[in-house]
Amino acid sequence: MELAERVITKATPTIPADLLLRQTLARRKQLTRADSAWISRAVFSYFRWRRWLDEAQPMNAQLERALALADDFAISPANFLDAELMSNAVPSWTPEFVTVSPEWARSLQAEPALWLRARTGMAAQVSAQLGNCDSPKWSEFTEALRYDGQEDLFRHELFQAGAFEIQDLASQAVGLLCAPQPGETWWDACAGEGGKTLHLSDLMGGKGLVWASDRAEWRLHRLKQRAGRAGCFNYRSVLWKGGPKPATKTMFDGILLDAPCSGVGTWGRNPHARWTTNSQDVSELAVVQRDLLSNVAASLKVGGRLIYAVCTLTRPETTEIADAFSAAHPEFTPLPLVNPFAPGAPAAARLELWPQVTGANGMFIAAWTRQAIPDPAPVG
Ligand SMILES: C[S@@+](CC[C@H](N)C(=O)[O-])C[C@H]1O[C@@H](n2cnc3c(N)ncnc32)[C@H](O)[C@@H]1O
């Protein structure tokens, strides 16, 4: 209880609760797996049910109440009214930017699923060795597994051997929708710690090249460690700050811009972020996203695929970015994508993936292909 309280009171917008929790637990090697799981659940339940708690109460009483609410919601969700969930589960600025439905609000209050991505061809082995794994109901995700066990997966020998990554199902959808082919050259422009770089590389069967850039050197360093473990060698990392000068003169078959965003789509998994993100972040990030998209687009070959992805659902960061890009770049035409969560539905150049449908993070994906600009008609 005391450790959970400490994490809650020390968490800030710049030191988020999930990071602080990871650091706190990692330092206390004497904790059992069950202790760590309890502390994590207490911290996340507190932030998830924060609007239901009485701040005047001592923190331990608030934590007990949050855990009781989490149990009650898991057993009897009908005890909670839609209106109450819609107004308490999200901060008050949200409805101006996102459609807050009862279904979305309910999904935000449920404890999230943990998704794994096995390396190509290894899902059956990973599932058999880990146990407590289920395949998703959508057949497109051949290597995805939902894990319901209690093990610390980061310490598992299969993880250490690079047989699987912990990667949310919506993030896996982004890699599948990029659909990179062996031998192609891709640019993962906001690669971060490389979650999607590793996926692209795996989908390419190690053949071809993925350029991974980010403005944060420490993130690229983490990518190098992860790539080593995953046996991913067909990537090249480069620092790129997002300006108009591209990371390289290479022209790409495909570009993925997994842009920095307000992260509203991760609020189920990361409830602390609900209370540290604000409407100004949305507006500021929309400017960054618009610039990044236009800056990367110049490096796409004619006929190539440009994929814009954000783990948020606010209109200024999703449809408005896609509209502005299409309007400013007539040589890019929308590229219809088949939604892996709705394979029978008509293909669409923009996909909104909602947590209540996918059981994963919320994500927006838009795609274009580049057309050759026709020669101007001869005059006279
Ligand atoms: C959504 S995260 C990327 C996650 C990563 N693609 C993955 O799958 O693990 C966005 C990344 O954009 C990077 N970033 C933010 N602003 C940037 C900029 N102006 N130029 C380049 N990268 C930027 C951040 O450092 C962060 O790593």
Image (tube, helix red, strand yellow):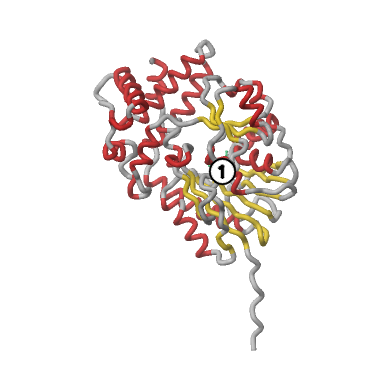
Q: Establish if 339 lies above or below 159.
A: below
Q: Nearer the viewer, residue 97 or 159?
A: 159
x and y, in percent, of residue 125 in the image: 66, 27
The C terminus lies in quadrant: bottom right
Residue in view at x 33 percent, y 41 percent: 102
Residue 144, above or below 209: above
291 displayed left or right of 316: right
The quadrant where residue 90 appears: top left
The number of discs equals 1
Task: Check mark 1 vs ligand 1: CB closer than 8 Å? yes or no.
Answer: no
The residue carrying mark 1 is: 173
In percent of width and height, residue 55 lies at 27, 26
Which residue is drawn at the image coordinates 72% and 33% (left, top)? 231
Kind of element beneath mark 1: helix
155 w.r.t. 266: above or below: above
Q: Determine whether, in the image, residue 354 is placed left or right of residue 64.
A: right
Residue at image coords 47%, 24%: 21
Amino acid carrying label 1: it is Ala
